Amino acid sequence: MAEAAVSNGGMTRREFLYYIWGASMALFTAEITGLIIWFALPRFQEGEFGGTFTVPADQVPEKNAAPRDFPDGRFWLVNLDTTTDQGQERMYLVNDEAEPIVGVAAIYKVCTHLGCIYSWIPANDRFECPCHGSKYRLDGRRIEDPAPRSLDRFLIAALDANNEVLAVAEPDSNGVFKPLPLPEGTVSIRVDTGSRVDGASQPLICELRDSCP
C-alpha cells in the first residue's frame, strides 16, 4: 500500500534504485571507453621517438658521405647516388640492381636479427652489428647474415620554407620506402618514426659477389 501510495505522486523506491543503478552503469561504461581511447590514441610529441623529427636540409649528409646519426629518433640519415663512381664503390652494387639508387633515406638503428644497436664502420664503408656479425650496406641492404632482412626504414618527406610538403618517399615493389630525391626548394626533412616498414628479404650481397666468409 505504501509503494502504491508513493507511485501516485512520483517514483517508487524500486524505480529510484533502478535509475541509480542504470546511471552508475552508464558512468562506468563511459569511463572505461574513455580509458580505452586514451591508451589507444598516440600522444607522441615532435622530436620524440614514435613521433616526427624535422631535420634542416644542411644536416643531411652529402651524397655518398658517411651516414648521420640521430640518436633521439633512433635513425640514420643517408644520402645515396649510385650514378657516380664513388657511389658505386661505397654501395657495393650487385647484378640484381639495374636502376640507380638516388635520394635520402631514414634507416632504423636496430639490427633486424635480434634487436642490437649496430654502428657505421668507416674503414669498411658499412654498418656492422657487434652482437652477431650482421653487416649492411650504406642504404641498409644486407651484406652478410644472420640478419633475416635488410634494415627497416622510416617514412620521410621533403618540406619547403613554409613547412609545406614538396615530396614524400614512395614504397617500392617490396613495400619499403624508396630513397627520396630532394626537390629544389627543400629546406628540411620530416622523418616519421611512427611509420616504419620492414626491410626487404633480398639475397645477401656477399653471395652475389661470392665473398661470404
Image (cartoon, rainbow, N blue to C red):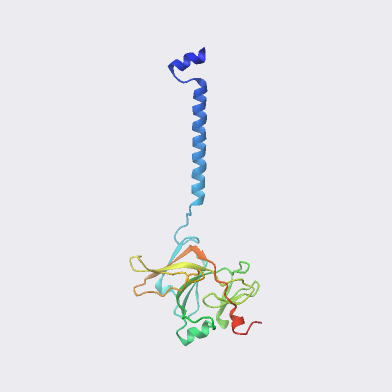
User: Residue sitting at 57 percent across and 68 percent down?
Assistant: 110
- Image point (45%, 58%), residue name: 45
Q: Residue at x 47, y 60 (%)?
A: 51
Nearest the camera: 97 or 104? 97
Tell me what residue is drawn at x 51 percent, y 33 percent: 24
Residue 147 at x, y percent in the picture: 62, 72
Residue 69 percent across, percent down from the top left: 51, 72
Residue 171 visible in the shown view? yes
Q: Left of 203 or right of it: where is 9? A: left
Who is closer to the viewer here, 170 or 186? Answer: 170
Q: Nearer the viewer, residue 209 or 115?
A: 209
**Considering only vertical position in the picture, is 33 above or below 65?**
above
Viewer-proximal residue among 7 and 17 = 7
Give how far across and how far down residue 89 sits, in percent: 52, 85
The C terminus is located in which quarter?
Answer: bottom right
Toward the front, the furthest residue is: 173
Q: Residue furthest top?
A: 1
Tell me which corner region of the image, top left, top right, bottom left or bottom right, holds residue 81: bottom left
In this view, 21 is above or below 64: above
Residue 72 in view: no
Q: How many marks?
A: 0
Instruction: Pinpoint residue 187: horizontal percent, then vertical percent.
Output: 37, 71
